[in-house]
Image (tube, helix red, strand yellow):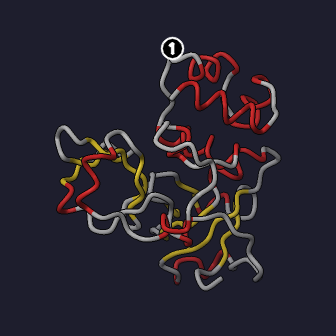
Amino acid sequence: MAKQYKLARKMKNITLTAAAKELGVTQPALSGWESERKAPSVEAVIRMAKFYGVTTDFLLGLTTEAEPRKDWLAPIDPSVLPALHETPVFSPDRGWAFVDAVSRQLKFASGEKMSYQDAGELYIVAANRMQPMLPTQAAILKQILPEYKEVWVEPISNDAVLKQELRGWYQVKKNYVENLVGQRFYFDFYGAKWLAFPSNL
């Protein structure tokens, strides 16, 4: 896998230092991933795939094809899950997880574990609703946020990597919004640190 991280970076024609900055990690951390001294998190693998413009399977050494295939938009056949050991898969209900073929479970970023049978539909790439998009409507007024169940969040930050990592669909709670991996934005900072947009973009 480590050689794939380096190959993807070379394909993008970017230095180690510049790539680390864009990925929001230290240069020693990225160097550690590329030399197999350290292993990146699931979120870091996904971030690398998006930034380098390759698939997670390419980074994990499961394919030599860097571009996503159209058939990856279909649900994974459950019978092939054992062959996807340590591969990230996407659940529309719970987010990203690693396949553990030994225990026949999925391991989610939250620490939750679930058997293959209970997981429901799984995908190699995230569902369209989880992909970055730019809002075309006006932001929701703060006072009516509680009327929504789900909103698209756009962080307000000069840090492009942070914005890309935090933007997406969030569930509306009592005093905050929260995404599938537990990241939150509180109503108190609405308009200063984030804006929300309707779920019918």
Q: Quadrant of residue 138?
A: bottom right
Q: Assess disc 1: are there few (<14), some (14-19) or many (≥20) residues with their C-alpha within 10 Å of its C-alpha.
A: few
Residue nearest the viewer, comparing 112 with 116:
116
Residue nearest the viewer, comparing 191 with 10:
10
Looking at the rendered structure, the number of numbered marks drawn on it comes to 1
Q: Give percent across and percent down for residue 50.
A: 65, 49
Residue displayed at 26% across by 41% down: 100
Q: Give percent across and percent down for residue 192.
A: 75, 58
Q: Considering only vertical position in the picture, is 136 above or below 165? A: below
Q: Give percent across and percent down for residue 94.
A: 37, 60
Q: Residue furthest front?
A: 64
Q: Considering only vertical position in the picture, is 154 above or below 139? A: above
Q: Considering only vertical position in the picture, is 194 above or below 11? A: below
Residue displayed at 61% across by 45% down: 49
Q: Give percent across and percent down for residue 176.
A: 52, 62
Residue type marked 1: Arg
Q: Is residue 19 left or right of residue 65?
A: right
Residue under numbered circle 1: 37
Quarter of the image for the C terminus: give it: bottom right
Residue nearest the viewer, comparing 54 with 197:
54
> Dot 1 lies on which element?
loop
Residue displayed at 52% across by 42% down: 43
Residue displayed at 63% across by 60% down: 188
Q: Considering only vertical position in the picture, is 129 above or below 12? A: below
